[in-house]
């Protein structure tokens, strides 16, 4: 009888069931995808570019947490450890500083209401955009994927008539054009460039005076990282070099970055700046895609600042666009800066 009992009892070194190995394999796969935000953005996995896969980090975070739950229920230690590492790695894209207000010795002064709205090849609803400009009391509007005709038509709306100072769209094909519209007088200046001449969009830069202080605004719209990944990466890295070399105390980078915090090139581009966009706690509000079959899952439209505090922010649906507009109400942090003359 004792011999029969010993035969019926599984030995500690008995072969593990296939479900154990399946859960282990899934855990390793989830960990691998969760580590993508630290992979160089110019890499490729087969036909897919790494930047495209990196945007899926919210899915990896959710899967990591799910595997942890399953692992705990099945007492699968290896799966729990791997999934916990995956969930931790997936937090890299939210490990950034949000604006905390002006520093000690600085006084908030003036006000600059900034809106960036991708026009989706000049297809955004003009009246809806006008309403947003009026409702949010917008002083400065950055419009990627605009055309001169779109800007002219928008200028006939009530909101458009508020923004009387404008840059001209130099690449008038819809995809490449970017316009900056302002309530205050602007001076167009040389800004950041990058990528090849063939794979670069308009990125105008302007300077304006707010509460007696100079403010530099760089519109941002790098080439998307679908086919020309290296041009996209080069454009973002050039943006980073430009903003770090800038001595401007008050700086705004606004537009469609075609990148999120999951991309190393984006983190390099905005290093030293604060994110003035809307958020749910530590998570940015998704801005793309909108109006399609997929829910919005990635934040690629941003307002990044230096020398400002953000008092309010929102992500706003604009009919006709596949992006949410991003709005932020900014106040200048004033220390010993001398008024512009």
Image: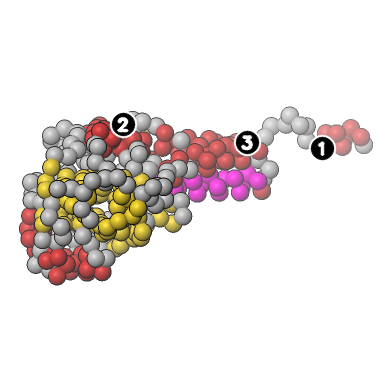
Residue at image mark 1: 8
Q: Earlier in the sequence, mark 3 or mark 1?
A: 1
Q: Are marks 2 and 3 in contact (CB under 8 Å)?
A: no
**Which contiguous range is marked in magenta?**
55-72
Left or right of 339? Residue 35 is: right
- Residue bearing the label numbered 3: 78
In x, y percent, where is residue 69? 61, 49
Q: Nearer the viewer, mark 3 or mark 1?
A: 3
| Helix, strand or loop for disc 2 | loop
Q: Nearer the viewer, residue 189 or 2?
A: 189
Helix, strand or loop for disc 1: helix
What's the distance in space between the residues labelled 3 and 1, CA to CA? 27 Å
The correct choice, above or below, for 46 with respect to 257 in the image is above
Which of the two discs, 1 and 2, labels the residue nearer the N terminus? Answer: 1
Instruction: Name the front one of labels 2 and 3.
Output: 2
For numbered disc 3, what is the local secondary structure?
helix
* Residue 285, percent from left and from top: 38, 55
- In the picture, measured across the screen, residue 37 lies left or right of residue 20, that is left
Look at discs 1 and 2 and give the one toward the viewer.
Answer: 2
Between 304 and 261, the residue placed more toward the observer is 304
């Amino acid at each position: 009888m004792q011999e029969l009992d010993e035969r019926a009892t599984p030995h500690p070194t008995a072969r593990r069931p296939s479900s154990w190995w399946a859960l282990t394999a899934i855990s390793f796969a989830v960990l691998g995808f969760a580590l993508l935000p630290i992979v160089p953005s110019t890499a490729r996995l087969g036909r897919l570019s790494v930047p495209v896969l990196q945007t899926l980090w919210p899915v990896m975070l959710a899967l990591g947490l799910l595997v942890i739950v399953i692992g705990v229920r099945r007492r699968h230690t290896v799966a729990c450890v791997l999934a916990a590492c995956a969930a931790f790695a997936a937090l890299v894209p939210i490990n950034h500083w949000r604006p905390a207000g002006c520093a000690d010795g600085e006084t908030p002064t003036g006000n600059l209401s900034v809106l960036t709205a991708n026009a989706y090849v000049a297809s955004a609803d003009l009246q809806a955009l006008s309403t947003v400009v009026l409702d949010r009391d917008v002083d400065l509007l950055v419009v990627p994927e605009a055309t001169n005709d779109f800007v002219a038509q928008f200028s006939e709306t009530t909101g458009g008539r508020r923004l009387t100072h404008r840059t001209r769209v130099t690449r008038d094909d819809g995809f490449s054009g970017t316009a900056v519209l302002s309530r205050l007088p602007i001076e167009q200046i040389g800004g950041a460039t990058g990528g090849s001449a063939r794979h670069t969009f308009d990125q105008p830069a302007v300077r304006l005076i707010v509460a007696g202080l100079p403010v530099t605004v760089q519109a941002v719209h790098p080439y998307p990282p679908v086919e020309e990944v290296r041009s996209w990466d080069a454009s973002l890295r050039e943006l980073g070099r430009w903003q770090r070399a800038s001595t401007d105390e008050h700086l705004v980078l606004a537009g469609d970055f075609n990148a999120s915090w999951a991309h190393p090139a984006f983190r390099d581009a905005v290093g030293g700046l604060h994110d003035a966009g809307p958020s749910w706690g530590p998570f940015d509000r998704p801005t793309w895609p909108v109006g399609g079959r997929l829910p919005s899952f990635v934040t690629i439209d941003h307002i990044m600042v230096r020398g400002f505090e953000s008092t309010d922010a929102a992500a706003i649906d604009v009919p006709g666009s596949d992006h949410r507009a991003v709005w932020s109400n900014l106040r200048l942090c004033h220390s010993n800066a001398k008024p512009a003359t």
